Amino acid sequence: MRSAEEELAIRNDVFRWLDAAFIGGGGYEISRAELLNYSFRGERIPLLDTGRGIRNPATFRSTLSIMSGWKKNRYRDFEDENGWIEYSYRDEEAGDNLKLIRAFELRSPMVYFRAVREGYYFPYYPIVIAENDVVERKVRFPLDQGLGFLGDPLQYSSDQRRYAESVVRTRLHQPLFRARVLRAYENACTVCDLKHPELLDAAHIIGDTESHGVPHVTNGLAMCKMHHAAYDRFLLGITADYEVRIDRRLLDEVDGPMLRHGLQDMHGRTIRAPSNRKAWPARDLLAERFAQFSGR
Ligand SMILES: [Zn+2]
């Protein structure tokens, strides 16, 4: 068994490593292969256990990570609409359960890997287990640790509920939405083709403050920061036939290369659509948004 100090040093190093590998890589997903290859001072310590949904290194006192499966192959985790994860004890693995309960008692900072697609994950860290239910044999924790202080979602007041919903929407759904949209568009701006994930956003066609502004890929467009800002300010529109339109007044202006090449030259272009037809932007949503653009 490692010393408690060394174990904590490894956990902190894992978070730094995820910052570099995941956020530094554009923050949209991280592969299983990368997660299995993590090493600390030359010693390889896989961050996932590929055979099950929980990673308990033999030399650790408590759990290092929990992961969700993909679609039907979920492990023992369940996510509710408030962004809390429930993870059930394993049936015949007393060792795993012991380390899971110890993670709760020691408040060990862990990672929760949520599957984005087969073999790819979105990491949430540091996660601390908030509740241990020995009767139901499961633990619970919020994906966003800022929600932990609110306690049981069933007891929320209406103000707390509204706050929790906005946190869930912006902090939990947004990263997954971004991951799906950028992947569908193969990390390229749908307007200008710029291929730098660090300069790309997942734009909503219908904003997420609207009831039908759902975080689904067909309500999204991968856009560079410039075109996203122009789209949000109605300086750039996209028709239901996937054509780019630039605001009339902007077309008449004379200015430098950003205006000329970055905006005016985009007028009339057909957007770059995802190769998967099912991920194409929904025509009715594009039409609704375009009506707002042309009505100005
Ligand atoms: Zn662009």
Image (cartoon, rainbow, N blue to C red):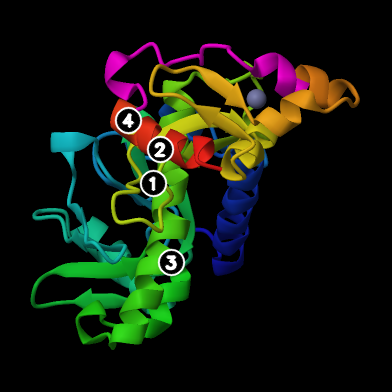
SS for dot 4: strand
Q: Name the residue that disc number 2 marks.
A: 121
Q: CA distance from mark 4 to mark 2?
A: 7 Å
Question: Could one spot residue 107 in this view of the protein?
Answer: no
Looking at the image, which residue is at 22% across and 63% down?
A: 86
Judge by depth and name the residue closer to the eye, 4 or 284: 284
- Between disc 4 and disc 1, the foreground one is 4
> The disc labelled 4 sits on which kind of residue?
Arg
Within 10 angstroms of label 2, few (less than 14), some, or many (20 or more) residues?
many
Pinpoint residue 46: horizontal percent, then vertical percent: 46, 38
Cβ–Cβ below 8 Å for labels 4 and 2? no
Mark pair 1, 3: CA separation: 19 Å
Q: CA distance from mark 4 to mark 1?
A: 12 Å
Within 10 Å of disc 1 (Cα), the crowding (few <14, some 14-19, many 20+) is many
Q: Secondary structure at mark 2?
A: strand
The magenta region covers 262-282
Mark 4, residue position:
117
Q: CA distance from mark 2 to mark 3?
A: 21 Å
- Going by the image, does 36 lie left or right of 86? right
Amino acid tagged 2: Tyr
Which of the two marks, 2 or 3, is nearer to us in this view?
Answer: 3
Any atom of ligand 1 within 8 Å of the CB at mark 1?
Answer: no
In contact (CB < 8 Å): disc 3 and disc 4: no
Most prominent secondary structure in the magenta stretch?
loop
Q: Residue tagged by mark 3?
A: 167
